[in-house]
Image (tube, helix red, strand yellow):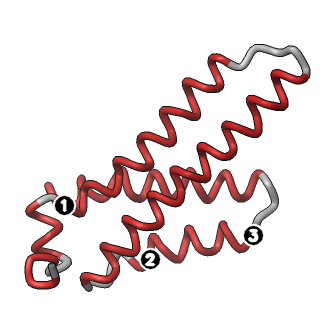
Amino acid sequence: MKKILLYIPVVLSLLVLGAHFMRYGNNAGVAIAAALIGLLFLRRPWVARLMQLVLVLGALEWLLTLYGLIELRAAMNQPYARMTIILGTVALFTLCSGLVFQTKSLKTVYRLDSAD
């Protein structure tokens, strides 16, 4: 049961990224996010490393989106502090989600001890 709980931040981060891509009409991004969730069932070292890379890139996507929205709202003289806190938190959560693959449980599942 404990191992299943470790997947929650990863799956949640991918779902939120998929929703973000859907919001902007990026169907390929939605499909990739969904496929990555399915890929978690493959117990290979490269899957864990790919997930970590994707989550870092996902955090960067959130930060780029945040930057664009701050510029837009600032140009329209609208407040953006709350949005900054929310999207900054989402970016940090997405980034930290990749750390679950560094836990002993998932290192064993994905055979990362022998791969590193």
Q: Residue furthest right?
A: 76
- Kind of residue at badge 1: Gln
Helix, strand or loop at mark 2:
helix
Disc tally is 3
Classify 10 Å Cα crowding around label 3: few (below 14), some (14-19), many (20 and above).
few
What residue is drawn where x is 59% and y is 74%?
32
How far apart are labels 1 and 2 at the CA level? 20 Å
Whether 86 is drawn above or below 44: the answer is above
Q: Which residue is mark 1?
A: 102
Q: Where in the figure is residue 1, as x and y percent of width and height?
A: 15, 58
Whether 37 is drawn above or below 47: the answer is above
- Kind of residue at badge 3: Asn
How far apart are labels 3 and 2 at the CA level? 17 Å
Q: Where in the figure is residue 27, as x and y percent of width and height?
A: 75, 69
Helix, strand or loop at mark 1:
helix
Q: Which comes sooner in the sequence, label 3 or label 2?
A: 3
Checking the image for residue 27, the label placed there is: 3
